[in-house]
Each structure stands twice: as structure tokens, then as C-alpha cells.
Image (tube, rainbow, N blue to C red):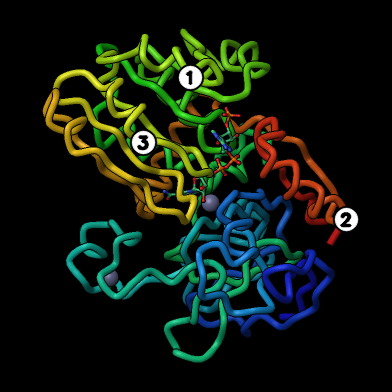
Amino acid sequence: MKSRGLAVENATSLLKTFEFDRRKLGSHDVGFDVKYAGICHSDIHTARGEWGNVHYPLVPGHEVAGVVSSIGTSVTKFSVGDLIGVGVFVDSCRTCDNCLKGLQQYCLEGMTGTYNSIERDGKSQTRGGYSNKFVVNEDYAVHIPKNLPLEGVAPLLCAGITLYSPIKHWNVGPKSKIAVMGLGGLGHMGVKFAVAMGAEVTVLSHSPDKEIDAKKMGAHHFVSTKNPEALIKLKKSFDIILNTVSAELDINEYLQCLKLDGTLVVIGLPGIPYSLRGAVMLDGRRSLTGSMVGGMAELQEMLNFCGEHNIVSDVEVISADYANTAYDRTVASDVKYRFVIDASTF
Ligand code: NAP
Ligand code: ZN
Ligand code: ZN
């Protein structure tokens, strides 16, 4: 299938128009017209080589929302005209313990990323959602509730699920005191979900001007981490801290804000190791853990939850020619709160 989108040629090049072929529709494949593609900070880390190992030219994009245009002969899950979403991966081994548990993101053979991966045929390279057309196996795509604005849904396919999954896994609820580090694409979804679960939510942000927005999203407290005293005052305050920060930081300052048996979940992935002080883990029997997106069943559950609670991402819709500026603004934490590319402009 002829496709047109944006690609980078190397770690320092800009996104430029790129034409390429997607595979012919297999019997379990669904073809769709992309309508919106979110810009995740992971796209930027990958495109700029910050995580190493990139197959260029790279077409990023793993928050892909569109409308089904064709279906393979054995497809049962989708019909032409349905809304469809694709997230961070497009395949996995399907047979390992983790895949069988519906945790395909932790596939023991490694999930097949929506971009920068080799398909399980061992030959073709996956290409992401910054493009006008997409082909995906029906098992790795989800239905989108019809009542939600599609541009606000696209970011749910990575940013949304990546915060929904740990919030569910660590049982965030009405008795939880939770902090979200970083009010960006992921962080703002964390606030919305934690508020929807009834938790008391604090935003820890290095951008003081985001306070009004954080409160509008339902956060109960906003703490500017620009003030060096701020985190000291929050010692032993939270049950859970969700770290969505995309840059290097001193993790110890945040760990000490956990209560007894509290848990800090690493979600942001700057690509630079954290340096950990053992003493801060011992005092309060604290846990440091991580979480990576969510499995296919949970992705659908999250979208259904959003449909029922009217939750979408706050987005700035842009045209393809603005994507390079959007990258720079995202890195500068100047995003409110997700850039989404209108696929009709590719
Ligand atoms: P984003 O929109 O750029 O948000 C990151 C936020 O981190 C910024 O808005 C900013 O919030 C804060 N921040 C940035 N630079 C900072 C600095 N120097 N000091 C302190 N805070 C800083 O990025 P995103 O798309 O939400 O992604 C966040 C991270 O999660 C990225 O590293 C991404 O690769 C990773 N990620 C992980 C998964 C997973 O499965 N675990 C999935 C997707 C993405 P404030 O302005 O409020 O401080
Ligand atoms: Zn992402
Ligand atoms: Zn597997």
C-alpha cells in the first residue's frame, strides 16, 4: 500500500516528507486511513538516537487513530468505516507466558514496535503513524469509542495507556495520595486518570506556569520543583509517585517524598542512568519500579473507560510542516499537552 508521511534520515536530520510501501493486506490485516498521529517524547528520543540502535530512515508515531478502509478476508474484529487505533506495538510472539497473560508489551521475545522494529517475518521494517495509510494485524488494533473527539483520542494510545496501566496495577483509588512528576503528554493523562479513580493528586512540575492547567485537570495540589525547598517539605507524603519526566534528574529527592512502603514508578526514559542512594530506599521500606505501556486487552479497557468518563488528551493539532517545531517545543516542555498531527497534511 502506497503511503506518504514524515521520516528522519539520521539522528541529526529534520523530519521530511517520505514515500514508502506498506505490506499488502494479509488475511488478518486491516488497512486504514490515518486521521491523527500524536507526537510522543519517545518518538523524539528514538529519532534523535538518544536510545541508540535506530533503523533509518525512521517514520515515527505510535499514537495512531484512523478509519478502516479495507479488511483482509479473515478479519472479524473490524469493518470498513470503523474507528481504529494502534499504539506502541504491532505484534509479539503470542505464545510466551507474558503474551498469553495479555501482557504483550513484556513479550519474552520482545514486542514488535510500531516503528524501528523488524516484523516477525524477519525482513520488513515497521514504520510508524506519521503517515496517511496504515496496515495492521487486527489483533494489535483497538476500537475507539464514537463519542470522543478523535484528535484527543490519538494520544491515549500511548500516553493514556502508559499511565492507566500503573494506576490500575498499583490500585490507585480514593485513599491514595499520589504525585505525578512532569505535566507533559504522559503526566497530564496521569492526572486525569488518578483524579477519575478518586485519588488525591499532586503535580510536581518544573514549569510554574502550568499550575492553572493542572488544577483544571483536577489536580488537588501543584508544587513547583524550581524551588529547592519544595521537595524537602514533601518528605514522606505519597503512596505512589509516577515519574514521567523525560530528562535527567536526582531521583533520590523524589524517593524521599514516599511514605512507608511507598512506590515510585519510573515511566519517563531519558536514556541516562539514575544514580540511586541506598539509604533513601531503606528509610521507609520504599520501592522503585517501572512500567511500560499496557497490553492489548488493557488498551481496549482504557479506551472504553475514557469513553464512559469522557476523558481525552488536551491537544494542539498541527500540520505536518510544523512537526519539527513541535519536537523542539516538546523538548522545551512547551506542549499543552500533546501535539497531534492532522494526517490529511502529510
Ligand atoms: P513530554 O510531553 O515532553 O513531558 C515530559 C515532561 O517532563 C515535561 O513536560 C516536563 O514537565 C518534564 N520535564 C522535561 N524536562 C525536564 C527537566 N529538565 N527537569 C524536570 N522536568 C522536566 O514527554 P512525554 O511524551 O510525556 O514522555 C515522557 C517520558 O516518558 C519520555 O522519556 C518518554 O520516552 C517516556 N515514555 C515512556 C513510556 C513507557 O512505556 N514507560 C511510554 C511513553 C513515553 P513540567 O514542565 O511539568 O516539569
Ligand atoms: Zn509513546
Ligand atoms: Zn510473547
Measuring from the top left, give residue 142's x and y in whole percent: 49, 53
The reply, left or right, for residue 155 in relation to residue 251 is right
Please name the residue shown 56% across and 62% down the image: 50
Measuring from the top left, give residue 107's x and y in whole percent: 29, 67
Q: What element carries label 1?
A: strand
Q: Do the residues labelled 3 and 1 touch (CB within 8 Å)?
A: no
Q: Name the residue under label 2.
A: 321
Nearer mark to the viewer, of 3 and 1: 3
Q: How crowded is mark 2: few (under 14 residues within 10 Å), some or many (20 or more)?
A: some
State which quadrant residue 2 falls in. bottom right
Q: Which of marks 1 and 2 is nearer the N terminus?
A: 1
Q: Is mark 2 on a helix, strand or loop?
A: helix
Picture quarter with the N terminus: bottom right
Looking at numbered disc 1 in the image, what kind of residue is underneath it?
Val
Q: Which of marks 3 and 2 is nearer the N terminus?
A: 3
Nearer mark to the viewer, of 3 and 2: 3
Looking at numbered disc 2 in the image, what kind of residue is underneath it?
Asp
Spatial distance from mark 3 to mark 1, Cα to Cα?
16 Å
Looking at numbered disc 3 in the image, what kind of residue is underneath it?
Ile
Q: Mark 1 points at which residue?
A: 203
State which quadrant residue 153 falls in. top right
Q: Does the residue labelled 2 lie within 8 Å of ligand 1?
A: no
